[in-house]
Each structure stands twice: as structure tokens, then as C-alpha cells.
Image (cartoon, coloured by chain):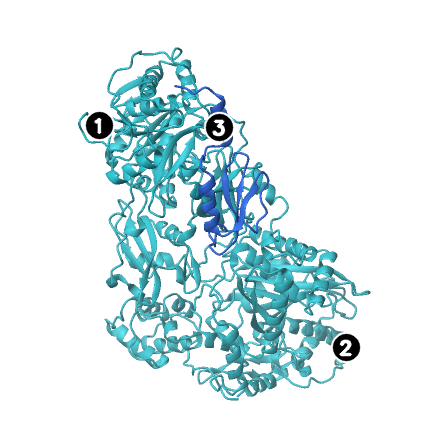
Chain colours: A blue, B cyan
Amino acid sequence: MSNPFENDNASYVVVRNDELQHSLWPATNPVPAGWTVVHGPDGRQACLDHVERVWTDMRPASLVAALTGDAPRG
Amino acid sequence: MIPLSHAQQRLWFHARDGADGALYHIPVGLRLDGALDRPALRAALADVSGRHEALRTVFPEVAGRPHQRVLDPADAAPVLTVTDCPPADRARRAEQASSRPFDLRVEPPLRVELFTDGAEDHYLLLVLHHIAGDGHSVNILVRDLAAAYTARCGGRAPDWPELPVQYPDYALWQRELLGPAQDPASLHGRLLTHWATVLDGLPEELALPGARPRPAVAGHRGALVEARTGAEAHAGLAALARGARATPFMAVQAAFAALLTRLGAGTDLPLGCPVDGRDDEALTDLVGLFVNTLIVRADTSGDPTFTEVLGRVRTAALETYAHQELPFESLVERLNPARSPARHPLFQVAVSAQRGEPRRPAFAGLRAEVEAVRTDTAKFDLTLEVEELHDPATGQPLGLVLGLEYASDLFDGTTARRLLDRLVHLIDAVVREPGVPLSALDVLLPGERADLLEHWQGAPVTPDARTVHGVFEERACAHPDRPAVLCAGRETTYGELDARAEWIAGRLRALGVRPGESVAVLMDRSADLVAACLGILKAGGAYLPLDARAPRARTEAVLTAAGAAVLVTDAPEGEPVPAGPRHVLRPDGRPAAAAGTAGTGGPGGHADALAYLMYTSGSTGTPKGVAVSHREVVALATDRRWRGGAHERVLFRSPHAFDASTYELWVPLLNGGLVVVAPPGELDVDALARLMSEEEVTGTFLTATLFNVLADRCLPALAALREVMTGGEAASPSMVRRVREACPATTVTNAYGPTETTTFAATFAVGPGQEPPAGQVPIGRPLDGTRLYVLDERLALVAPGVIGELYIAGAGLAQGYLGRAGLTAERFVACPYGPQGSRMYRTGDLARWSADGQVEYLGRADRQVKIRGLRIEPAEIEHVLAGHPAVGQAAVTVVDTAAGPALAGYAVPAEGTPAPDPRELREHLRARLPDYMVPATLTLLDAFPVTANGKTDLAALPVPAPATAGTAGARQEPRTDDERALCAIWEKVLGVSHIGVHDSFFDLGGHSLLATQLLAEVRDRFGGAIAIRQFFTGPTVAELAAALPAAAAAGAGAEDPPIVRRARRTQTA
């Protein structure tokens, strides 16, 4: 069985949710609810390169918001 | 002398071996209500048998060859056996009578029995041997019998036109028409060339959905389930067929092929297809065996639409019909597939068209009705029988009657029923949408989607936004004096632990640790290690446990990747520690306050902040840091399955850097239980058992390897536990059973979960009084709030019983791999089945849902291998090998040999049992697995090499020694007089020289008829009769020699027909 995320010859997109988490996604599959295409369609590696470039703070957005809203603990 | 037709010859071979029981009997029942004229019936039977020579043909052997001998009508009138019995007894008696074997040498192939209650209620049973007729022959027989009876009741002989030809004419004609198979210019030779091309590269065996492992010898027991489509679906399918210039039957073939593909049987599907063989008008009204079985090779590759599949099936079917004269047996001999008594050669699934025949033949003065009689047999794994119903007045489609005959060895009624229901469902779907790709067709039955998405999933949970240390602090407040940690005989209370952790947190804050930063921990197992983890959490950090055994370079790489701010260690001052962190903290001071938590700032932090980082080996060699938040640890610890007291005293034994420690620490501590700390370093098994007993541990997690060792050697230690969990790799069914039996009060739980889903994602518990499952141990159902999906290549839900890849979503999902955005984005992917914007983790594991909603783990997706074109999952073979009572652990890998990749099996003997004989293990495997899954080599080891986290290290298994290479090895010369004599017989029969005693007869060009000849020679020489089926299971000189003494002993008093020498096969007409 070949996995739909492991095909170097297939077309992919990069999708992002409200937490600003990113996911590789097969371009031929419908995008699940709550996700938006932010890159592609493109090759697999190009999509992953894009993710590496833009997803630099991997914490969920709601956590970042909560932390910046709070006074730092210490 | 009249030779047999080709098809007859095949059946004669089967009948002669006597192993197939009623497989080739065709029984038909006739209910006759009214005043039955028995003399007229007897006369009518004589008329029918007189009319059709096939019904009075016997098959004696002369000079070793069977031939057709047509008896004189006067000598062959069927005997009408009359039995008085109440109607309730009929079914049983009819079944018995249907199964009674025929002696085709002397007995005409039609038997007739009349069951009567003496009054007006009669039941006439006709049993026809397949050698004398086919399905259509039965219709002719009943029709002619009715006509003859009606005539005889009127005092006349039946007035029917003379038949133009008889069956022996056909047999001679067929041989002349075909000519010799060896002659490439003959029709026979040309057909063989055609079929060899068409069937090139055919898969040897289809993996059928929901099928049990195939027994070594097919039992041919079978049963039937039936279903009917609606008139609309029938009409729709017929319209699709018309549009493709195909028949409705071809459309059903295409639909069945599509279904099998969707259920995991692959995209190259050889479907057996009976062809009528009555092309010549002269044969229309003749009883006889004309049907032939050929193959429609359905190609469903490339995710075609149903319309495309129908077009392909039509082309294949038309080609089949155009080349239908080739006898199936010739085809088998030519293609010479790896023969196995376990399966039908060349195809295992058939689709056959049934003709709708009148159910009410006209017997004068009687109300007659034809009733099907089943013999509870199955020729193939699955046979789909298709009958079209039409309105007799208008010709409108009324529905398709679909019967699915299944081999009881492989399927149970529920599985077969579900398969057939799925077909009806799929027919509805393709009629609605013939243009969608197969992969987009819905093959789930109504209700199954809800099972897969809701009923079988983890119970919904309300969000819990507490932090790990927050929950702990609640506990410490509630019962500060309760013991929290027991280490080396010394107890630390919740209050003390909290204070100690608070002190460490203060030190960390003082060192400038900021929320969200990671703090590395390099400590031996101790109470202070527990306090350090808690303290790091209290300071807002994430703990990063380091593996003390790891090479320093790897540890430093991990520290750099994680950006650890501080290293907490118990290494004495002056001892070198890994470089990287800004500070080193040695928490050897005493806490400032002895107890109390109220004044220390209280719980802070966010549930989505990271609680820990755990580095696991990556396939690329770079370790990857799994980042787990507080929320997921709290979700694990608050799962309802820990309630009930089994996890009150939990052993902290796993290396801290592995994720089992998450369970070992936080399940007891967040539930008010006790962590029993095992002494530092590696623990030997006896020390571990002693510790568990002495400290009254109630619950523990053991890797499969360790579980097996304890199950072998330390059962009492396990018996004292309330629950023992095992996991990390597939659980050994025999070990689970052993513990279940020997430890009646202990719950044995198979636990599954990658580090990426916070230790456990699913568990399967076998509680006291419960029977462990017969086969492999499932991984069960997801934890509360967790969801498991088994998906196909298009991320669609696969039906229960079908293998797919396992995805995990919901509670427990890690945030990702720290600092590895790309890797995270390809493993933690958007989830189409969960709440909006949720993710799922792609495990890379193969799994399937069982019919009752338990997930079964089937190994790594990337371990699947192909050998001789067959997909093989080594884990399946490991399960079977581990099922042998003398095997403790099993492993199967693929090794490269000169002949291509081959399977290598490894076993560690179970403790306390004698080491198994590899030959015996091989027998065990052969009895349970298809030939192609039996490893070429079996190697016994004292222990398996293990990886750092205790899993079997497959890559480190030794290359199998050529000396143990068995069948794959060099030729073995005969070693005894018997073997030498047998080799001489083989050389003579096969025309091959230098036979090795382990060479397979069938690999050397042997086939079933040659095998008959071989066994006849063996009987002449040794006086013992070996059954052909027995020979199939051991087709080597060595195995034959081993079977001889028993055969000779049995042969003395046996009444078996003599085995007669036979020529190669062909006869001239």
C-alpha cells in the first residue's frame, strides 16, 4: 500500500489551520474543514521547504496569544 | 476404446483420489404432490437413461487408462430406491444420499431415490455425478423425465426426436478437434499459446477480505448466502451494460472485481468463469459434461471508473469466450503454477451465471417443483452465482439474485453475508454514479460509517485545561501525607515531593529558565528524578530526559537541537557532563520548606505549553524530538481506564528517556497513587520480579520482550499484579494466553501507541475470567478522547476486515517534532474526520478493524515485502511462528539469495520447553500458512538482539547459515536405500536426472497426473499407498520416504482401489 503522503511524483498543497499549524496535503484530496491552502499545488519537497520557511514558531497560535497576553512568569 | 473428454479426465482424477467427497455431486430434488405412479416413474427413468448415453456410462480402467464404457440400456436403468420417511426427515436423508460416493468404475453416474410418506407427498432425489453432466444437464434431465413420466402414465413410450449425437461422440470429436497439446500448430497448441500470454504474471493467490488463514489442505466445505438487488439496480446495471455493449453478467463481474479491489485484493483479479461449451446445436438437448472453466482476468489498475472496468471486463470476457475450447486442466499443466492442495490453481474466486429454469416441470397428474439441494461444499474460495429475474410478461428486469458460495475454512457466514451485502450496495452506487473512480465508491454498509467514526472510538471528553503540575498540586493539597514515591525502601509523601519540586523550580527560575524552555535531565532513577521533572514543570519548562547510555555526541546533538537552558543532573561535581546548556544544576541541597504548597506561587502555566520533549530515532538517523504538551499528559493520566485501583502502585522501571515513563510517573501521581522506583540501571529479570512482589506493585508496563521473559520464568510475580500491560511490538498470543491462564486475577492488556501520541493510543484488556482471542491479540479501542482511523491510499475509511494504514487523532496527539516544521507537517496532517482544523498522526503502521470493532495491528507498512509477486507481511508469519508452544519469540526478515529475496525466520525457544526442531516448526508453519509464506530458512537463537528501547533489532539478526537453508539450499543426495529408490522413480517419471531429496516434485515439472503415476510406481515398489493429497503437502523425496513406513503398514489391510500405472496424459482417439 502506498501512502498518499509519500509519493514524490504526486502534487501536494500546504494547508494551515487557525492555530497556524501546517500540514502537507495531497492536492487531489478535498481540503478538510478548518484548513486553508497557503501554498501549492507544488511538488512534495517544495511544499515541505515552504513549511520549513514559514512555520518558524511551531507553538499553537492560541498558546502564543495567551503567553503574550500574560505577564511572563518567573 | 472411447477416451474420456478432457473435463471428464480431470474429474476422474479427483474422484479416484476420493478426497473430494460430494464436491462433484450435483443433487437435485423434486417435490411431487399427488398420486404418484411408481411403475411409470421407473419406466420413465429407464427411458431417460436410455436416451442419454452419459447417464449409463461407467469408467473402468484398462491398462492403466480410464475409458468410457456405455452400458446397454437394459443393464443400466437407474434403480429407484424407495424410502418411507416423514417429510421432516427428508432434508437429512437427502443430504446423506447426496454425499454418498460413486464408484465410477462400475456404477452409472445417476442415482435416484424416492422419499415418500406413503400417501401423496413425495420427494424424488436425483444425484448426478459431475462427470456425466453439468448444470444445464440437470435441467434437460428433469425436463425429459417429466415428459417420459407423462407419456408412461398414458401407457405410451415417450415420443421425442432422436438425439443427433451422444456424449462419447463429443469426447472423440473434442480430441480430434483440439489435437495434441504438444503440437504448436494444433488448435490445442494455439489455444495454449494464447492463454499463456493472457495469463502471464497472474497472481498466485488473491488476498481476500476477512479471510481466515488458509489451512494447508483445502477442506472444500462450503455454504451459501443469498441476496437480491432491487429491480431498479438490475435495470440500471443492464442499461450500463447495454451502453458498453456488454451483458448484465459482465457488469456483475465488473462490480465484483471493483469490490474485491476496494477490499484489498489488488488490481489484477483472475475470476473463474464457467463457459457453457454447448456451442454446437447438436449438443443443446444432450446430457453430458460440456461446461469448461476458464478465467476472466479483470484489470482494475489505475483507479478506473466503473464504466472503464466494465469495458475491460467485457474485452477480457469476449476473449475468454473466443478461446473457450481449451480444457482447464491443460491450462494448469502448461502454466504449472506453484501447486498447493490449499487453494485452487490459477484462480480462487469464480463468478457464474445461472440460467433461470422453470421450477415447475410438467409431470402428468402431479404438482411438481424443483428444489435445490446443497451438499455443503465449495469448489473455490468464493463463487458468485448470478441469476437475472425478468417479468415473464414484459421482460422487464425484476432484480438480480446473487448467491455467494464460500469456503467455510476461510469465511464464516457473517463475513460472507457482509461481502455480499457490500456487493449489492456497490451495484447501487455504480448505477447511480458509473463515472466516479473506484477509489471514490462507498463500500461501507449503512451503519458502518457510524461504527468507524463514533461507536468504536474513544469516549468524548470535556476539555481539561489543567497542567500536569497543577493536577499534582491539587493532589498534594488534598493528601499531603500520602506516600507519592517509594525508592530504595524510603517513602516520600505528596507534600514532601511537592516541596522538593518547588525548591528545584525556584533554583531553575533563579538560573533564568523561561516558560517554554526545555530543561535537560540526566539522572539515575530516584525520588529526586521525579521531583526534578515536577520542578521543571513548575518553573514553566519542559523536561528533556536524556538517555545515560547514549553516546555523548548524540546527547549533545539532542541538547543543541532542543536548546536546553539548564542540565539537571545527579552526576557528582567534577564529573564531566554533556556540553550545551547554559547552566548545570545539581539538586543535592535540601528543600527550604519540608511541606506545604500554599505559599509557593500556586499552579501556573498553560495546558498547551510543552511538558516534555522525547527524542526518538528518526529513519534518517537524526533523532527527532517529540514535543508533548501538558494537556496530552493530563488526558492520558485522567483516562477512565486507570480507575479501579490497578494503577495505585506503579513500577517506574522504563528508561526515563522512553515514553513508557510518562505512564509510570504521571498515571500514579495525578491519581493519588504511588510511584515505586526501581533501582538505577538495568534490572535483571529476577530482581524485577522480586521488586514487584516485595513492593506490592499493582500495575506495570513491560515491553513485549520483557513480558515474554517474565511469562516464561516469573509467572508468580505477574500473578500478584492487578494489571500487566505489554506493548512496544506485537504481543505474543501464546504468552498472553499463558499469563491469562496462570494469573487468574491479573488483567493482561495489550497496549499500543507511538511516542507521538503520548505513550498509549489504544488498549485491549483481557480481564479475569475472559478468554484471550484465538488468533493475534488486538490493540483494541482508543483511549478516551482519542480516535483511530484505518485509511486507504485516498485517505478514505476502509471497511472492517480490510487492511489500511493507521492514523491517530484527538487526545494525546503531540504538538509535533521540535524545530522540525517540515517533518511535522508530513506526519501530523490535517484530519478529514475530526473537528474543524484538527490534525491526525500518520503512524506508518498497518491495521484493520475487526468485525466487532477492535483494531488489529499488522506491523509496519514499510515492512511489507513482495516475493514472487505476492504481498507478504512478515508480521503475520511472526504471529504464526510465535503461536508454536515451544517458541518464545519470533522474527521474520527478508534476505537476499541468489534466487532473489527470500524469507528468513528466527525463533527464540520458550523458556522451560525443549528447543523446537526446525523441521517441526516448518510443519507448524506449513499447516497454517500458504507455501509462499513459509520462510526458506529457520534459525534458532538464544535471544534476539534488541535496540536501545528494548525492541527486537531486526537489522542485527544474523544472516541465516546456508547449512540450514532447507529447500533453498544445495541439492541433497539421497541418504538411504529408500531415498535412492525413490529418486530413481522420480527420475523415471519426470525424465529429470540428479534429483535432490528436498527438491519439490512440482518445481521439477511434475503435475497432478504425473503425481498419480509416481505414486502408483511407489506403491508397486514399496507396497504402501500414499494419498495424492498427502503427497501434495510433502512433495519431496525426503518427505515421501518419511511417509512410507506408515503407508506400508496401513496398506496391508486397505481396500483402496489399486493405483494403476498411467501414461503421461494424452491418448489418441
Q: Using the numbered discs, state the Cα–Cα distance from disc 1 to disc 2 in whole angstroms.
A: 109 Å
Q: Amino acid at mark 1?
A: Ala
Measured from the top left, where is residue B809 in percent x and y? Answer: 50, 38
Helix, strand or loop for disc 1: loop
Q: Are marks 3 and 1 in contact (CB under 8 Å)?
A: no
Q: Is residue B23 visible?
A: yes
Instruction: Assess disc 2: are there few (<14), some (14-19) or many (≥20) residues with their C-alpha within 10 Å of its C-alpha.
Output: some
Alpha-carbon distance for marks 2 and 3?
95 Å
Looking at the image, is mark 1 or mark 2 nearer the viewer?
1
What amino acid is labelled 3 in the image?
Answer: Leu
Q: Which residue is mark 2?
A: B151
What chain does badge 2 belong to?
B
Rendering coords of residue B353 (x, y %)? 65, 67
Position above or below: B1063 against B348? below
Image quarter of residue B541? top left
Q: Which residue is mark 3?
A: A63
Element at label 3: helix
Q: Nearer the viewer, residue B368 or B39?
A: B368
